[in-house]
Amino acid sequence: MNEKKTKMFYEYLRLHKKAVRIYILFTFIYGFIFFLARLPLLPVLYASLLGVFAASIILISDYRKFIKKQEHLERLVSEIMVTDEHFPEASNLIEEDYQHVLHVLYEEKCQLTERMDERYSDMMEYYTLWVHQIKTPISAMRLILQGEDDEKQRALLDELLRIEQYVEMVLAYLRLDGTSTDYVIKSCDLDLIIKQAVRKYASQFIRKKIKLVYEPVSFQVVTDEKWLLFVIEQVLSNALKYTRKGSIEIRLDPSATLCIKDTGIGIAPEDLPRIFEKGFTGYNGRTDMKASGIGLYLCRRICSRLGHEIEAVSQVDVGTEIRIRLSQKKRVFE
């Protein structure tokens, strides 16, 4: 008898301990009365043994029903199908009342889930519409600013780029939590993806006088181009944000790992294990007051969906290296 069955047996005895105690009590009373009346105790012993035998048969049959009911309930839990249609037949009024309570709770849960789904759907539609609408004035502002070329204009373009990045983060967040995805998994030229990301932040490289160390990697990766581009852009954005001088290096290791290394302020050792957590900004984020705590969280989720892995290695005042392992362990469409 394994541990689970032993536990169920003791639980069954615990549920019926009152009946067992009453049987023992009445047997003792009969025996005591026979003793006081100086009657033979042998009939009492025989009656007790017959009673034990009959009770054992009844208990064994009832215990089997108890086991079947327990297994049925366990299947209901595993299947998450708690409805009145799948409950075992109630054997008494108390069980009927319990099943009625659970049925009412289940109906209330269904109604609550339906209301929450409706609210979530409305919220998704609103924010998706907002993201697409906000892109229009952003594009208009960029066109206006491109008419001039001075330090103030370049600073405004950088801030506008930051706004665009936050808008893209909102859109990515909404799409990741949506019921449908737009992944297009195919073989992509990694250099083309990297160059798109570098081109987007070229003005910041120039303005901050950060050297870019990059040689074409000549590598084909099976991924979704748009989502991997988002990840690389987020990593480059962080590198530029926390690098005041020096360089940012982009290279591909022989193990098909894309490495983006900067010479920035680095990450504190106690913060490093948590930088991919949702909303975590760490010491640097609290000091800089520009971190949202969402970018790297989205990067990890996206990489997980694409079958890639992302990790960070960092040393304070030396720099940070983000490593994106591009080999696919589990593809999104499988």
Image (cartoon, grey):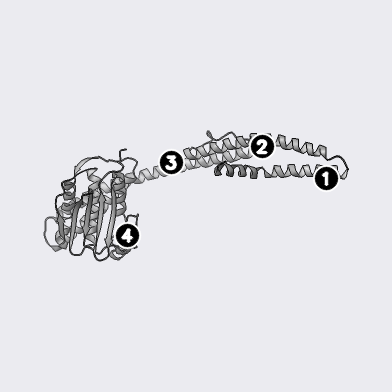
Q: Is residue 75 left or right of residue 239?
A: right
Q: Quadrant of the C terminus?
A: top left
Q: Nearer the viewer, mark 1 or mark 3?
A: 1
Tell me which corner region of the image, top left, top right, bottom left or bottom right, holds residue 3: top right
Q: Amino acid at mark 4?
A: Leu
Label annotation for residue 272: 4
Percent x, y of residue 70: 56, 38
Tell me which corner region of the image, top left, top right, bottom left or bottom right, holds residue 120: top left
Secondary structure at badge 4 equals helix
- Residue in view at x 47 percent, y 40 percent: 110
Judge the density around disc 3: few (<14), some (14-19), many (≥20) Cα neighbours within 10 Å.
Answer: few
Label annotation for residue 288: none
Mark 1–mark 2 contact, CB under 8 Å?
no
Q: Amino acid at mark 3?
A: Glu
Pick the residue in front: 144 or 274: 274
Q: Nearer the viewer, mark 2 or mark 4?
A: 2
Pick the residue in front: 112 or 191: 191
Q: Which residue is mark 3?
A: 114
Q: Amino acid at mark 1?
A: Phe
- Which of the two discs, 4 and 1, labels the residue nearer the N terminus? 1
Q: Which residue is mark 2?
A: 59
Judge the density around disc 4: few (<14), some (14-19), many (≥20) Cα neighbours within 10 Å.
Answer: some
Q: Nearer the viewer, mark 2 or mark 3?
A: 2
Mark 1 to mark 2: distance in Å?
Answer: 26 Å
Q: Is residue 104 left or right of residue 20?
A: left
Q: Amino acid at mark 2?
A: Leu
Q: Which residue is mark 1?
A: 32
Mark 4 to mark 3: distance in Å?
Answer: 40 Å
